[in-house]
Amino acid sequence: MSAELETEAASDDWAAALQEQSAAGAVQAAAQPAVFTRLTGDGAPGTPRDIDLVLDIPVSLTVELGRTKIPIKNILQLAQGSVIELDAMAGEPMDVLVNGCLIAQGEVVVVNEKFGIRLTDVVTPSERIRRATR
């Protein structure tokens, strides 16, 4: 199979997974009230803020399996095949961080031999703001 066909097949698999997720999300969204309201420029109703200015700003998204603290001497002894014990238990949700701030938790999924993460719990906007101002 050529690289182009493999890429197209992988895209189709991810598209199917995302479509399945959006169908499940639509049912859940219908049961929940809208969280976001339209942003306004000066606080006056009907004055749109140009949110498009920030939509293309790149951010760093990290999925964290767990953490640990180890002395430098142990780091220097690491070799291929070494195992590092983390504080997270198997099966626990993983943290999803944007620029170091927790925004969600999720579970690992594998689609066409590539890893992804299905979000299971998203931090509310008010909680994100509260954490960011600490």
Image (cartoon, rainbow, N blue to C red):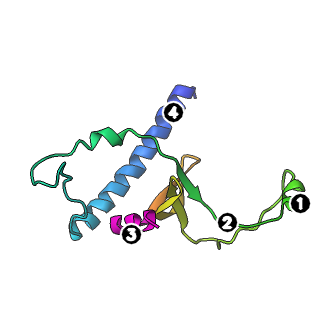
Q: Are marks 4 and 3 in contact (CB under 8 Å)?
A: no
Helix, strand or loop at mark 1: helix
What residue sits 27% from the left and 44% below the top? 51
Q: Quadrant of residue 26?
A: bottom left
Q: Nearer the viewer, mark 2 or mark 1?
A: 1
Q: Residue at x 12, y 47 (%)?
A: 47
Q: Which mark is drawn over residue 115? A: none
How far apart are labels 3 and 1 at the CA level?
38 Å
- The secondary element bearing badge 2 is classed as loop
Which of the marked residues, 3 or 2, is nearer the chain's N terminus?
2
Residue that carries the numbered disc 3 in the rendered image: 127
**Label number found at residue 7:** 4
Nearest the viewer among 123 and 23 is: 123
Label 3 sits on what residue type?
Glu
**The stretch drawn in magenta includes residue 127:** yes
Q: Is residue 65 above or below residue 10?
A: below
- Amino acid type of disc 4? Thr
Is residue 94 left or right of 70 when viewed as pictured? left
Which circle marks residue 73 in the picture? 1
| Secondary-structure class at tag 4 | helix
Task: Estimate the spatial distance between the alpha carbons at disc 1 and disc 4, rounded to whole Å.
Answer: 43 Å
Earlier sequence position, callout 2 versus callout 1: 2
**Disc nearer the start of the sequence (1/4):** 4
Hey, what amino acid is under mark 1?
Lys
- Which sits earlier in the primary sequence, circle 3 or circle 1? 1
Q: Is residue 33 magenta?
A: no
User: Disc 2 versus disc 1: distance between alpha carbons?
Assistant: 18 Å
